Each structure stands twice: as C-alpha cells, then as structure tokens.
Image (cartoon, rainbow, N blue to C red):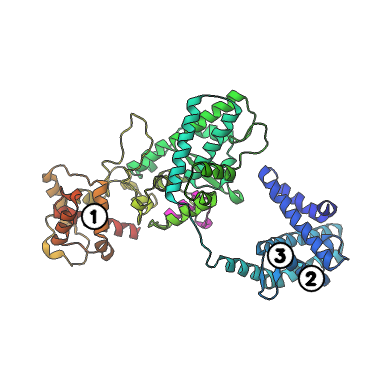
Amino acid sequence: MKVKSDPLILALGQRKFDKTGQYPHTHQYIAQKLRELARFVIALQKIDSSIKTLSDCFSAKHWETVISAVKDLALFDNASKFFSKPTLAKKIGHSLKNCAKMFGNNALKTGDRALKERADGFIELYEEEWKDRITSQALESLEQAKYNRVRYLPLVEDVVKLSKFIDNQIEDICKEKIGNKEHFSRLACLCLTQIIVFNRKRSGEVERLKKVSVSNAMKQPSLVDEDVKKCLSRFEQKLCENHCRIETRGKKGRRVAILLTRKMKQNLGILMAMHAELELDTEYIFQKPNTSFPIRGTRALRQLADEADLKHADRITSTTLRKQLATMSQVLDLSESSQDILAQFMGQDIRIHRDFYRLPQSTLEIAKVSKVLHAMNTDMIETVAGKDLDDIDAMDHLEIEQESDTEDGTDDIDDGATCTNIRSCPKKKCGHQPDDDAADDDDDDNGSETDDEGSENEEYLPPTKKKKFGLKNQNKQMGKKTPWSWNERQVVEKEMKLFFDLQKLPGKHDCQELIKKHDVLKRRSWTMVKGYVRNRIISINRQLKQ
C-alpha cells in the first residue's frame, strides 16, 4: 500500500519500466526496488511522523533523519560501526539520489523554484556526506565479512559425473520417443543444465534463449573467413566446424556468446521438434507449457545435481561454476589478448576500452575458449597448465565430436607449422608460407648435430642465418621427420622446465638421462630432445616479443 500511495516511488518504477520493461525477468527487480523505498519511508515515519511521502524527506532539515533511517533499516551497529545489511544501504542510496533528481526535474518543469532548491540542497548534501557516512562503512562491512571466509569450488569429478549423468538421461528420453508435455519439460530441463554446465554461463542468460535465435543459429553453417582460418591451428579449425555460437543478452545488456557442441545441437533439434509436435506457442525454447516464464536455470541445476548423487552437490551452482572457470584459467599462462577473449565470452568485459571490434570475435571464442571448456569438462585441466590459449594444440586426448568422414586434425600438428596469433600474424604467414624462423622450428624437431656437449650451461643465443641454412639442407638429406606426440611433448616440457625458465639449452648428459628415465622417448636421440627445447625457447621468445 505504501508503494501505491507514494507518487514519487511510482514515478521511479515507471521510469525503470520504460528502460527495461520489455524484458519480463526485470519486472521482479523493479518491484524489489520499489519495496525497498517503501520500507525506507516507513523507517522515516518512525523517526519523524511529519514525513508522509518520500518527497517530504528531500530537504536539508531532514538530512539527519534520512541518515538515521538508512542506518536503522540496514541494521547499523554504533559500537562496531558496521552494517548487518550493507548492500541494502548502498541500494537505498542509489535510489534516493535518482528520486531526488526526478523530484528536482519535476519542480523545474512546473517552475517551482522552492522545490527545486530543496532538491538541489539534498543532492549537494548527498554528494558531500553520503560517501563518508554510509557508503564507505557499507563497503568496509562487505569486505570485513569476506575475511577468512571459506570458498568452496565445485569438484571437477562432480562436474564430470554431472555431465555424464545428463548425457545418459537425455539418451534415455530420446530412446523412449514419447512426445508428451512431461517428457518435453524433462528434456528441456536437461538441455538447459547441459548448456549451463559446459559454457559456465549465468543461468539467466541460457534460460532466456529464444526459439528464433536457436533456430537461426542451427540453420546457418559455421562460416569462418578463409584468411582467419589460415591463422588457426588444425585443431582449432576442427572446433570451428563442430561448434556453433549463439548470441544472447547478458548482464547490463552485454552481448554474450553461448557455444553448442554437436551433441547439444542434436538435443536442441529434438527439443524444437517436440515444440512443433505439441504445438507449443512459447517464446523461449526452455519454457514449460502453459507458463509465461522460462524454466529457472538455478532450480534445474540444483535438482539435477541432487539426482546425480554428487559428493558435494551444494557446490554446483552457476556462480561457482563461473568462479571455477575463472580460477582454473589462472593455471593457464594467458596473454592479455587471451584474457580479453575469455572475459568477453564470460560476459565480464573488464577491458571495455580494448574491445575486439576489429577481430572476428565469434571465430575466436569458438576456436580458443572451447578448448578450455572441453578440458575442464573432461577432467583434463592439468594437461594444459602453464599454457596460453594459442599453445593448446596437441589435445588429441579430448573427445571432439566429428563426422565420420573427417580426419583427426591433431596427429600431425607441429610447433611453428601453423600461425595461431591472429593479432600479430603478417599476411605472408597466413598463406601457408611460414617465415624462416617458423620453417627452422619445423625442420629442427629432429634435433641438430651442431649442438655439442659443451653447451650444457651456455646461455641461449638466437641462431644465425647461416646456421639455419645449414640445418635446412641437413634435414632435407635426413628424409621425413617424425612428429612429436602429445605424450613426448608433455614429458620434455615438464622435465626440462628449468631450462625453459632459464632460457638455456640442456647438455648431452641431461638429454640422455631424460630418455633413459621415460620410455616414451626411446625413439628420440639426445640431439632431438635438445632441438625440441631449443625450438620451444625460440617460440616462447617470439610470443613475448609479440
């Protein structure tokens, strides 16, 4: 009743509705803001009964009353100087400032100078005192509450188990081939949770996917510009072929992307067919029959996590999954450009001024981010530790859905053979014509007989042109080189990490001891191991210069 009887509170609600009212999920948010102001007016009246409406408090003489009412409402402790509800104090402050401006604008429109002066005086006091008396203490209360708080992330094994559980449930429903509303609701819940878990998206961003958007994205082929495609590794090209990307509205109106694997596209295709079969006239693809709103993603995720019998089902929420991705990404050695790609994909554009409006963002998100998502959802994140997005290439251990007539694109990937840095790649590198350094990296995988035993502790120096020329001729006579497998690379990069960090080459003894220790390197000579370390140091230095 207090909201309906206060014209200024209603005017604020109307303004917010004009701004975001076209999105039904914001209606509850608007109502919450109005209820907060109504509670604030009630708190004012308990202190000063002469205040009848919100506009009555916009006067300099009522400023102390306003401060006291906010503190009472947010449960401020005078002894400790902390708020029990600090966020409420901050929210009321924002709303009060907006209402004071609206009150002043109305006075300006009607030509009432007295009311205009009252509003200006209140705003001036707000600007001068609110930060020190309310905001700073509220922020300090929030920070204090975070100290020594135990933060639990979802277990990777729980995420993997949940993903497999969802896949099995979807397969069972598809086998039954029963097109009733109950099965549709179950399948919609499963598909919704599957996309949230894989993409680590906010649940609201996925649940509000519209049928039109999904239908258009599934009909359009995965088009990648040929010039851009040449700058991607073969593994990344396969990801672009097997994934599609849908854009939706995220927090604060940001445009966020959702990636769909081949299985997800098939599941959504079945869901769309059930839409047509049941003649459901709904706007959202995850909307239950005879309802006005889509399925709540948080509720669906919580329900399936309980059904999957996880060790810590309470940790599986869309927020903790996003924190898990952000935390695990710190294990990777991400460059600034890779951090921007990942942040923009998550809908957290922390570098708005460095937006990639000049780059094909859709291709980058599919090719780069999907590698991390697959690694996390298959419990393989430790295999990509310390790598940048561009370095995650030899991932043949990941199961990427491919058509039967496509070949594996990871078996013959070599360092330096394909340009993966789109920002710094010159045109001459993108036409399958690598520069001299890249060609030297390729040819030198088999090792170099020119590196002698005395180089054990020597500092790394870039090769000269003459040396590169001799290596090329030498390797031409040696015949076809043997590509390094993923396991071989992992062993060398792990055991030789000290040499990578020091930018020095290992000696003959170091390489021979490594070969003896690991059977996977039996087919390699010590010169091949040393050559691989040398090539990786060159590659690392080149990336640092870029």
| Disc number for residue 324 | none
Residue that carries the numbered disc 3 in the rendered image? 74
Q: Decide whether residue 345 is among the magenta residues.
A: yes
Q: Quadrant of residue 503?
A: bottom left
Residue 413: % across, % down: 28, 44
Is residue 220 something that shows in the picture? no
Q: Is residue 211 left or right of residue 153?
A: right
| Disc number for residue 63 | 2
Amino acid type indicated by mark 3? Ala
Which quadrant of the figure contains the C terminus?
bottom left
Of the residues tagged 1 and 2, which is closer to the observer?
1
Task: Identify the magenta region.
Answer: 337-354
Circles 1, 3 touching at the beta carbon (< 8 Å): no
Kind of element beneath mark 1: helix
Kind of element beneath mark 3: loop
Q: Decide whether residue 29 is among the magenta residues.
A: no
Q: Is residue 91 above or below residue 226?
A: below
Amino acid type indicated by mark 2? Trp
Residue that carries the numbered disc 1 in the rendered image? 492
Question: How far apart are the two marked residues, 2 and 3, measured between alpha carbons?
Answer: 17 Å
Say which label, 1 or 2, has the lower sequence index. Answer: 2
